[in-house]
Image: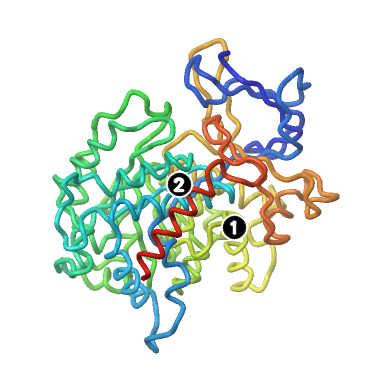
């Protein structure tokens, strides 16, 4: 059998809901797991009926997987000036305890939680490269491979972003003792990328992460951007994909002030002046962006990676979302430190922060699209797919008669029996899902044509959770 046929009562497309959508998923003819023909407003004709409300899976464009295991452990005040910078010291101490097996157990549990919440791809901003004392593992890719194995075990798509981290500040100071395990030189970093790219497949994409301007000197940034050109990749890589480039930027006021002092420019301003920023790039946070930077950045088609629950938890500030949307800027969402693992909560708080600032409602909506939920969900799908470097986020099919391939078959089946959705229709379904409660409405999850969650349960969640509990008990003993 070369394909499987499915029918959705309503499926979410880039321009909204379509009724009676039949689609095929390739079972081996061209590219297993890819969408083939997608046809709205046709009868099922023997296809497997999925349910009334089907939406594309959400990409999570920013994750530090190990931080899930410390969520809730930094909520006691120790310093009267408690801030991101004091939280960072707690994070360093926890990161210093982890080896590859620990990281794999933590990440696998996290990825199960992501899938059950509706994320089907995760961009892992990974900087735990060396042993805690800064010495290399016998296999320099050990910690990266732990994440690859975790994603494979859980069944989530992974954009692995090995992170270059070289200095402790804009002044070029060496890394501190607890930052030593993050370190790479440019040559070692490029060797790691080259090795990992040969592993790419439909589930795995490799990209570049520059930790931040304070951690990556200018010459190193240019050397990496030059070094990735023409880098070989696996022949089984997802078609139509690009190599994404991510960077933390302008998250904290202190970072902006330090950049001004050292480089006589604000972080985003400096990056735009010194790097070829385009649609491959994802600027994570970009919280403290001014109007001039906003217009210039939107024109590059780069994605801004917003992580509202983490940004609130760390006291970062609030991104100027309305102006960015008016400028037709691209956004995606991430769970970052995983104080929450829910795309719905990220989207809800993305909007709510704007309401608190402006004292108005429905800030993200527009004349063209009056549904706040539709703007948020649709925008995050599009930007998240770009930042992931993988063809996901919409129902785009290939040609079943020609060797062309559609998007990867990542989809969520919402629970149409939930009382929360009673009396809802296509005009208010997404708004209700995002803004009307905390019940998980994601019943089934498909990634690359495979069911990984059915009836709210992950296919291997009990065993994965038991291993996670054992690891955490040992780490906290």
Q: Is residue 297 toward the left or the right of residue 422 in the image?
A: left
Please name the residue shown 65% across and 36% down the image: 13
Q: Nearer the viewer, mark 1 or mark 2?
A: 2
Q: Measured along the vertical axis of the image, is residue 351 above or below residue 73?
A: above
Q: Which mark is residue 374?
A: none
**Residue receiving disc 1:** 347
Residue 3 horizontal/vertical position (percent): 58, 18
Mark 2 neighbour class, 10 Å CA radius: few under 14, some 14 to 19, many 20 or more: many
Q: Measured along the vertical axis of the image, is residue 99 above or below residue 30?
A: below
Sooner in the amino-acid sequence: mark 1 or mark 2: 2
Label 2 residue SS: strand
Mark 1 neighbour class, 10 Å CA radius: few under 14, some 14 to 19, many 20 or more: many
**Residue receiving disc 2:** 122
Please name the residue shown 52% across and 26% down the image: 33
Residue 208 horizontal/vertical position (percent): 30, 45
Do the numbered discs 1 and 2 sit on residues whose CB atoms are within 8 Å?
A: no
Residue 368 horizontal/vertical position (percent): 69, 47
Q: Measured along the vertical axis of the image, is residue 322 above or below residue 405?
A: below
């Amino acid at each position: 059998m070369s394909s499987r046929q499915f029918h959705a009562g309503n499926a979410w497309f880039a321009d909204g809901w379509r009724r009676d959508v039949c689609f095929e998923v390739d079972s081996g003819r061209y590219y297993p797991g890819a969408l083939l023909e997608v046809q709205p407003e046709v009868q099922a004709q023997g296809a497997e009926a999925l349910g009334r409300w089907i939406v594309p899976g959400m990409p999570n464009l920013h994750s530090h997987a190990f931080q899930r295991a410390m969520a809730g452990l930094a909520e006691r005040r120790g310093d009267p000036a408690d801030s991101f910078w004091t939280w960072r010291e707690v994070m360093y101490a926890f990161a210093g305890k982890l080896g590859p097996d620990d990281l794999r157990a933590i990440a696998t549990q996290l990825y199960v939680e992501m899938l059950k919440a509706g994320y089907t791809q995760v961009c892992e901003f990974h900087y735990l490269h060396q042993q805690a004392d800064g010495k290399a593992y016998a296999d320099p890719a050990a910690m990266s491979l732990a994440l690859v194995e975790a994603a494979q075990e859980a069944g989530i798509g992974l954009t692995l972003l090995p992170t270059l981290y070289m200095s402790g500040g804009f002044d070029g100071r060496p890394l501190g003792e607890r930052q030593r395990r993050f370190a790479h030189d440019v040559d070692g970093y490029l060797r790691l990328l080259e090795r990992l790219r040969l592993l790419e497949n439909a589930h795995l994409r490799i990209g570049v992460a520059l930790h931040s301007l304070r951690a990556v000197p200018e010459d190193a940034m240019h050397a990496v951007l030059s070094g990735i050109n023409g880098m070989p990749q696996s022949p089984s890589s997802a078609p139509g994909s690009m190599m994404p480039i991510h960077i933390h930027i302008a998250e904290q006021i202190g970072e902006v002030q330090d950049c001004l002092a050292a480089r006589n420019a604000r972080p985003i301003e400096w990056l735009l002046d010194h790097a070829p920023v385009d649609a491959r790039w994802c600027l994570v946070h970009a919280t403290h962006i001014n109007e001039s930077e906003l217009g210039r950045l939107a024109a590059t088609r780069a994605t801004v990676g917003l992580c509202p629950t983490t940004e609130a938890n760390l006291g970062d500030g609030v991104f100027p979302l309305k102006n960015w949307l008016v400028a037709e800027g691209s956004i995606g969402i991430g769970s970052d430190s995983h104080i929450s693992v829910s795309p719905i909560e990220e989207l809800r708080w993305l909007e709510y922060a704007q309401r608190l600032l402006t004292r108005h409602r429905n800030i993200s909506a527009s004349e063209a699209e009056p549904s706040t939920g539709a703007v948020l969900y649709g925008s995050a799908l599009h930007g998240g797919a770009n930042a992931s470097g993988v063809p996901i986020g919409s129902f785009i099919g290939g040609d079943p008669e020609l060797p062309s391939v559609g998007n990867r078959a990542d989809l969520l089946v919402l629970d149409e029996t939930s009382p929360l959705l009673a009396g809802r229709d296509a005009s208010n379904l997404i708004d209700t899902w995002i803004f009307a409660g905390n019940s998980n409405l994601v019943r089934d999850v498909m990634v690359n044509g495979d069911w990984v969650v059915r009836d709210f349960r992950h296919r291997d969640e009990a065993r994965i959770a038991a291993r996670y509990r054992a690891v955490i008990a040992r780490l906290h003993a």
